[in-house]
Amino acid sequence: MDMQTSVLKPRLSFWQLWNMSFGFFGIQFGFALQNANTSRIFATLGANPDDLALFWLAAPVTGLLVQPIIGYLSDNTWHPKWGRRRPFFFIGAVLAAIALFLMPNSATLWMAVAVLWLMDAAINVSMEPFRAFVGDKLDASQQTAGYAMQTFFIGCGAVIASLLPTIFESLGVSNAAVGGMIPDTVRYSFYAGGVVFFLAVTWTVLTADELPPADLDSFRKERQQTRGIGHAFTEIVGGFGKMPRTMVQLAFVQFFTWIALFAMWIYTGSAIADNVYGTTDAQSTAYQDAGSWVGIMFAVYSGVSALAAFILPVFARATSRKTVHAVCLAIGGLSLASVFLIHDKHALVIPMIGVGLAWASILTMPYAILAGSLPAKRMGYFMGLFNFFVVIPQIVSGLLLGFVTKHFFAGHTVKTLMLGGASMLLAAVLTLFVTDKAAPVKSGA
């Protein structure tokens, strides 16, 4: 197989890595606002806690449809000025900025669900080519550093975005859900997110270049031969049977990892409101205060991930990437489950440190392990296909977690977080069975 690691690529400087990854600061700004505030918005607009997981289905279903298509299209795109991936960065940024402005102005629950669909699709249009971008531009010796730099910006963007409602409240902006409307703190946060998303992604579009296909004439000829919806559909579906062994093994790890993460994003707000603030009334001041505190909790795990992004590759060189990933997932699973035992809001910072370590590894190690097993000309497609195993568990969670929470946990969503922790622990065990074909390599910039 034509592996991307077989082609020697120029070694990039620290600032080149910085520029090509900076767009992820904006992308995660959008994702963090979505993750920390969507359930709060749904609840404020009248959603029943038992139905939150179902309403969140819009996000993973969108990813399931968008990711492999965008990956396939970007693999088969080349423009002398815009390159291969950057057109998708920019188009996604424009659409995501619009969605971020629309979300806090949702007047009804179903409007919010529809905007979540649009927002997640737009973010995915930008995000998926970014994963392939590292494989396109970096030699194997820098790939872990490339994904680590992305993880750093993901952490930084998420910290600021998660804290924004609290920051605006400290500046005197109202955090109250007056008349069942979304608080001003949340509205202004999404407006800021739309601006940051667009500017950060545009920075990468303007400052990073792209390597042309190794044989441009052959690329153009093949692209002419493969045009057509029928051929594209066949290629996209047919890829499932051509997944490398490492990708299949990582798929199981991803499945149980993302069940845990989806449970955390959906239910942490209501879990903390119930378990710490003693309320389930989404219109109450206490519930909205819990929502703001969850933003702080999420900022902590995101900040830890930003710092850990550059530390984990050091441990990976000393041991192995899969060992580091397994340990981090185990720590994250135990930390998430421990939230059930904590009733003081300040103590909730402690488990978020463990979740942050897991999050840093989740955003770095699986992609670094995978990149070495993929063919260069289909890097975008397979990275998109790999994310099926991010969105499929989210769909499973959306269909089942609400039922489990209602009928097995008597509506106490903090117990759902415990279930998520157990799922992440299982992912840690499965990581030990992954084959990492590429030996540990130097990952410095």
Image (cartoon, rainbow, N blue to C red):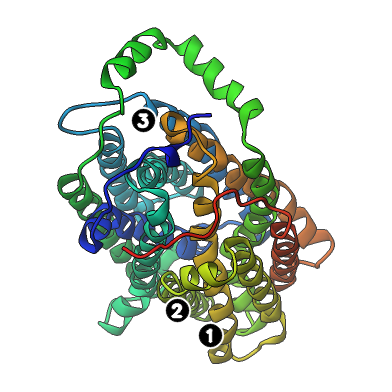
- From the image, tell me which residue sits under label 3: 74
- From the image, tell me which residue sits under label 2: 296
Instruction: Judge left or right: residue 420 versus residue 29.
Output: right
Residue in view at x 36 percent, y 78 percent: 166
- Tally the marks: 3
| Label 3, label 2: how far apart the Cα atoms are | 36 Å
Q: Is residue 241 above or below residue 382?
A: above
Q: x%, y% of residue 192?
A: 25, 62
What residue type is disc 1 on? Val
Residue 426 can be seen in this image: yes
**Which corner quadrant holds the N terminus?**
top right
Q: x%, y% of residue 129?
A: 38, 40
| Label 1, label 2: how far apart the Cα atoms are | 8 Å
Label placed on residue 230: none
Q: x%, y% of residue 126?
A: 35, 43
Residue in view at x 58 percent, y 78 percent: 354
- From the image, tell me which residue sits under label 1: 349
Q: Is residue 97 above or below residue 309?
A: above
| Label 3, label 1: how far apart the Cα atoms are | 40 Å
Q: Is residue 1 above or below residue 152?
A: above
| Furthest residue toward right | 408
> Neighbour class for label 3 at 10 Å: few (<14), some, many (≥20)?
many
Q: x%, y% of residue 430?
A: 74, 57
Q: Is residue 310 above or below residue 224?
A: below
Asked if marks 1 and 2 touch (Cβ < 8 Å), the reply is yes
> Neighbour class for label 1 at 10 Å: few (<14), some, many (≥20)?
some
Instruction: Judge left or right: residue 421 versus residue 47.
Output: right
Asked if marks 3 and 2 touch (Cβ < 8 Å), the reply is no
